[in-house]
């Protein structure tokens, strides 16, 4: 896998795939999923583009907030169910 580069971030992996790169392999190590892409200058340029994209950073930040709201609501609903059946 010398000519492959691993990516842990789902967001970076999705961005690369959206830009036309192929995940050559997907592996698991210590509970983390790794996406492996063929190393190239253009791939590193796309990763840099991803990291410098302020709109994307804002979107991902808000996505995290929305996920937290969803999980909080799910926990509240589950707690109510537990009380109802107790």
Image (spheres, grey):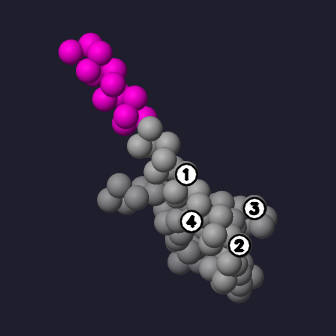
Q: Position of residue 59 (x, y in %)?
A: 65, 64
Q: In the rendered structure, does residue 76 fall within the stretch colored magenta?
A: yes
Q: Position of residue 17 (x, y in %)?
A: 71, 62
**In the image, is 38 to the left or to the right of 5?**
right
Mark 2, residue position: 55
Q: Secondary structure at mark 4?
A: helix
Q: Which residues are magenta?
A: 74-86
Q: Position of residue 15 (x, y in %)?
A: 69, 65
Q: In the rendered structure, does residue 61 fall within the stretch colored magenta?
A: no
Mark 3, residue position: 18
Mark 4, residue position: 61
Q: Nearer the viewer, residue 44 or 62?
A: 62
Mark 1, residue position: 66
In the image, what residue occupies the spot 68% across and 70% down? 56
- Sequence-first tag of 1 and 4: 4
Q: Is residue 27 above or below residue 4?
A: above
Q: Is residue 13 at all visible to an observer of this figure? A: no
- Sequence-first tag of 2 and 4: 2
- Sequence-first tag of 3 and 2: 3
Q: CA distance from mark 2 to mark 1?
A: 16 Å
Report the predominant secondary structure element of the magenta stretch: helix
Crowd tier of the residue under label 4, counting other residues whose Cα lies within 10 Å: few below 14, some 14–19, many 20 or above: few
Q: Is residue 8 at all visible to an observer of this figure? A: yes
Q: CA distance from mark 3 to mark 4?
A: 19 Å
């Amino acid at each position: 896998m010398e000519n492959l580069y691993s990516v842990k971030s789902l967001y970076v992996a999705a961005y690369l795939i959206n830009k036309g790169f192929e995940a050559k392999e997907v592996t698991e190590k210590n509970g983390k999923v790794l996406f492996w892409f063929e190393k190239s200058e253009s791939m590193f340029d796309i990763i840099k583009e991803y990291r410098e994209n302020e709109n994307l950073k804002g979107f991902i930040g808000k996505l995290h907030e929305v996920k937290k709201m969803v999980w909080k609501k799910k926990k509240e609903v589950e707690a109510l169910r537990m009380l109802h059946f107790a």
